[in-house]
Amino acid sequence: LRALSPQDLRAHAAEALTRARERSVALTDIDDEELVRQHSKLMSPLVWDLAHIGSQEELWLVRDVGGREALRPDIDDIYDAFQHARADRPELPLLGPEETRRYVREVREKSFDILENVPLQGRRLTEDAFAFGMITQHEQQHDETMLATHQLRKGDPVLHAPAPPPSRSGRLPAEVFVPGGAFTMGTSAEPWALDNERPAHEVAVEAFFIDTTPVTCGAYAEFLDSGGYQDPKWWSESGWAYRGEHGIDAPRFWKREQDGWWRTRFGVYEKVPAAEPVVHVSFHEAEAYAAWAGRRLPTEREWEKAARFDPATGRSRRFPWGDEEPTPDHANLGQRHLRPAEVGAYPAGASPLGVHQLIGDVWEWTSSGFEAYPGFTAFPYKEYSDVFFGGDYRILRGGSFGTDAAAIRGTFRNWDHPIRRQIFSGFRCARDARPGEVA
Ligand code: AVJ
Ligand code: FE
């Protein structure tokens, strides 16, 4: 992006903003009653997400980059995520569905006018180009959140998409060896990287093994069927307490029937597909499975080394497959499909070490908390990352089938509470390499 001319930067930003908006419109193309309803206490009404998308765009593109007058200063507070918890948002004097749609359209017209007129060169190039990227990613992040709300809604399916490609990698080894040594983590070069991904820095990693693919539903069902949810020995103390308090006895949306495990997926009741990565598990469940399997979750560093390290050059790549932007051959992204793909479905997306499906399909829990990299500076606002450092959050990596390509890369860091599982969360396991052990 740095090398792009102002005209090409404009075209790139316009295309990404338009794709995000088409998705937001599709996710909110439902009855008014469904738009204003709270489908789960964990989520906002969809109409809040949509107006919040517009409100953030007004703040950062219209007012900040454009220096234009505020359209709706009166609603800043209602759509400030830090002022109101999700559970309380239905009680706010929210804009109605029609008013919300009109508001986001008006903001977008102004943003496009600003995009046409900012110089996108010289002193403010980095900041202004970043602002358009940040707002695009923000909209896509809320689109993924709205997709999770759709998964929680009751009733007949309203979203439809073709099935993802089947497994096409042949027989894969269970695990891959990742050599020890330093590698470059994070980035100082990605123009759209958020503050918490910066700066690039060297970190040391001991040799380890990581699963070739995410843990499948079939493997996870073995843990369930062997009584894993009844035995505290696999669970951390807080995980076991959480399991008991919330009556957790299987991944979210799973149900046991006579003939095995079934699940509800965007309004469809279906047999759990054994070859797909398991999704809708909490960090606690992921950690318990790993203990039962005699393994552990990877640290965030290990995950990123497996995803980016190129042993031939010692360089860190942007993505496992190289530096090119994701295509539909590389990864299951962008809500093209309404489910994770079978393991082995993306051979072209594998890393040079042979690790598959690191990007797309399911977010992967790591054992690491959310902390600042050395040299971190909050940008452009503390509430994006800074206020979350040091909490009980766990890092998730790689994006899911519901993450757009604009909002994922090898350095992207997501985080959530260890009890959360309405998100599209799965995991893969790792283990220490024994001294002298090489694959
Ligand atoms: C980075 C996904 C944890 O959705 O809470 C959206 C992204 N920040 N609006 C979230 C975000 C502000 C954030 N996550
Ligand atoms: Fe937000």
Image (spheres, rainbow, N blue to C red):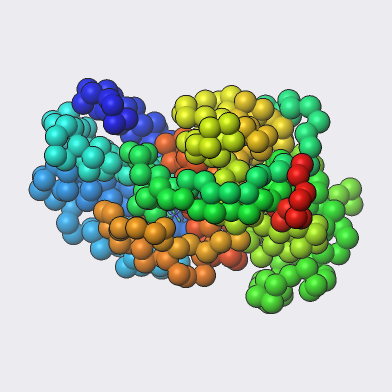
Residue 95 position, x and y percent, is 29, 54
Q: In the current view of this chain or complex, which residue is farthest to the front? A: 436
| Residue found at x 41% / y 65% | 388
Q: Quadrant of the C terminus?
A: top right
| Residue found at x 18% / y 32% | 120
Question: Quadrant of residue 20 in the image?
Answer: top left
| Residue found at x 58% / y 31% | 312
Residue 396 position, x and y percent, is 55, 53
**Apparent side of residue 384 relative to residue 171 in the rendered image (left or right):** left
Q: Eyeballing the image, is 412 above or below 319?
A: below
Question: Quadrant of residue 169 in the image?
Answer: top right
Residue 11 position, x and y percent, is 28, 24
Q: Eyeballing the image, is 280 above or below 85?
A: above
401, 162: nearer the viewer: 401
| Residue found at x 60% / y 57% | 299
Q: Eyeballing the image, is 40 above or below 406?
A: below
